[in-house]
Amino acid sequence: MPICIQEFDGESGIGNSQKVADKPTLSDDHIKVWALPILPSNNSGNRSRKRSHDEFEEQVPSSDSSKSSDQRFKDQVTRQAVVSEMFNSDWRMDTLVEMPIAEVSLPATLFVRNPETQEIQPYTGPKPGDSEPLPDIMVLVRKPWPGALVESLPPTSPSECAMSYIIRNHDFDAKKAAALGVQRGPDYRKLTENQSVLSKDGQTITPDMVLGESRIGKGVAIIELPSVDYVENLIARPEWKSTEVMNGMTAFIWILGKGVGAHPRLQEFISTMSQAQHVFSSPDYSPNDLTFRAVARSTMEFSEIDSARYSPPKYVTSPRSNVPRPEICVAKPGMVVNLEPEFSIENSQTERNIDIDQIKRSVGDPVRGHVDAVRQKFNEILFQTKVENMRQSIPNNDAEIITLGTGSSLPSMYRNVAGTLLRVPGHGSYLFDCGEGTLGQLKRVFSPEELKEVLRELKVIWISHLHADHHLGTVSVIKAWYEETFGIPPQKTASFETNLGQFLSEKRLCLVSDIHMLDWLAEYSHVENYGYDKIVPLAATSYERSSGYISSVLTLHRRDKNGLVQEQFGENRGEWINFDSPKHQFMSPFQAATGLSSIFTVPVSHCQGAKAVSFTFPSGLKVSYSGDCRPSEAFTRIGRDSTVLLHEATFEDDMFKDALAKRHSTLSEALMVGKEMHAKVIVLTHFSQRYREMPNIEKAKKTGFVPKFRHRRSPGFVMPNAVRDIPATEETPQGPETSDTADDLSAKEDLSLQKALDDVPVILAFDYMRLRLGDALHAEAHMPAMKEHLSASEVEF
């Protein structure tokens, strides 16, 4: 779908003539839209746009702190061009361009055309930069995606502008429609939606035949006011005095920050708009009710089976306070505002309160019988001895794993996307990936007071790769951590600390990932003050020595004043932590700041920059996390003797080819990695959203396809290149650094898995699971009952 961007800076509207206010920002065949940018009353107009973009970076001379309008225009053209290339480009991945081999910019995949058959074949000869001389030939290369040619976006700065909108339907002539024989009701609605209908006598009636001046199209205003500082400038907008805009206005949807709804000036404004229905969405009035009912119900069912691991999500159904006026109602999930043919607010699709007793009844007698048998097993001496032996073998056996999101790709009815919290008493909390909605999931698992404690003790966030389902919730979590840690919203900072030792001595949050994730966080800090200046951004790299030992280094992420990442080692490279040297100058500060002894990473086969990780604690506790990937031999080496392995198991074994094509792991492949690691506990997660029923673990142990590993060297320190070939995706393999696994096509049945994993608890995770490591055998024992319940349940997708 073509997209055209238009920026609103908040300076338009106030003081504009009525004629300008009458003109809609957008008008098409369906609706008219007026955009209402609103600044807080304490904003000095252009102040936010003139702040130096280096406020989160190293200081630069004051002459660079503001830019001319001409430069801002050029920057905006660049932004528009990038967005246009994203959505409107005719670039295709399979387009090849012919050029002399000497002019090729690496990395790139090269092809040649066979002069006899005219077939296109991979080029295997010398390449630019090799020691051998280049042949004088023409080669075919894929033309880079145009957006990749832009090394970095133009710098910007946070804006306090809040966007609101007025939306009006086109005018509809009801008399004409009736005269043409259009049936009142749904057919009227279809015509306002630009659809043709049949009249009572079978004639086709088109929208242009009934759109006119006799009936005024109804409208709705969607208003966002983050704080009371925005109220005055909202009221001063000229649109409220425009007959063109306000005729037919039937509803106001208010998105309000704390304390805004009761503001006297806002209430006075609402009283002048009493002809319209007002709907408030506000933390002052909206209850903290459940939005995703299916997963909440599922979790409550699980709590009937395994109450030690699952408990009902935290929610409140009663309103926090009463709305200040009778014409105001509170927004609810599923509420529908109908504008045409008659205005109404429809609540038929809003969810009723969850019936706890009905949920309890949904767990059938056979399942309850299974649960009773499991609980009896817990009292057996043999089981208790096994549990005690396992607890003694596990350092920090009171550590807890909370799976916040266990699905892949996109949030679904039953699973959110990737996010796993590790809590180690006496050390801190650690997040492995942070997909969108992670903060919301934390609020469902923990009470408000518990969540405050979790955020205060949060030490490290690890992001495995730059796919949206693994990182889009990161900023929200950092912002919540900042507000809880420092007691205030994130503040503007004049400079960005670049001394790693100073970093680690202060109260900060470590963010460890591939350098591209850190680039994104730095760039996004120009858009929102979310607390970037209080994180420790550490870029993870690894390399393999000739002995086969994998070294891991964390480098402080630094950017020069124009925002570009340094691409070569040199004086501008940030300070680093080398885990090969216990006496390294930053090892002691790092351990004190994070509670960790080391972080080892390896590149894995999934997408560009994807990595797996192992966290090791002074006590010997070791937690290894795969992220998304094909099985990795290098990962089994850094994760050797892991206390717990968290591994993706996106596909069941009958979808091995899908796993291979999309660079994910099957169930038995994940188990095999745990076997090779000698992991004491295996937790499987990141399941394809096509499944709700539990995969068959026992079958996977007996007949699963297990790939042979092929030893492959890690690529060493990989510094980013300004222009890459095709952006790596799940469908396009990208270079040797993303495929340290092996000859997948040599996969064969391996019957040794079952024997090797007989004494290893394997737990299939669902959202909101809270697993104490010392209770892993109890969790595993409940798996058959949960599987039986899911198989017997009527599942609605």
Image (tube, grey):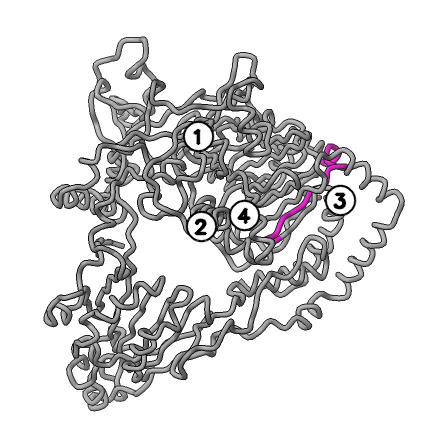
Q: Which mark is residue 455?
A: 4
- Residue 45: within the magenta? no
Q: Nearer the viewer, mark 2 or mark 3?
A: 2
Q: CA distance from mark 2 to mark 3?
A: 35 Å
Q: How many residues crowd around disc 3 within 10 Å: few (fewer than 14), some, or many (20 or more)?
A: many
The residue beneath circle 2 is 476
781 in relation to 63, above or below: below
Badge 3 marks a residue whose secondary structure is helix
Q: Residue at x 37, y 67 (%)?
A: 255
The residue beneath circle 1 is 539
Q: Which residues are magenta?
A: 754-768
Tell me the amino acid under the disc marked 3: Leu
Q: Earlier in the sequence, mark 3 or mark 4?
A: 4
Q: How many residues crowd around disc 2 within 10 Å: few (fewer than 14), some, or many (20 or more)?
A: some
Q: Nearer the viewer, mark 4 or mark 2?
A: 4
- Dividing the picture into quarters, in which one does residue 313 lie? bottom right
Q: Earlier in the sequence, mark 1 or mark 4?
A: 4
Tell me the amino acid under the disc marked 2: Ser
Query: Pointer 4 and pointer 2: residues touching (CB < 8 Å)?
Result: no
Q: Residue at x 50, y 50 (%)?
A: 484
Q: Residue furthest top?
A: 132
Q: Earlier in the sequence, mark 4 or mark 2?
A: 4
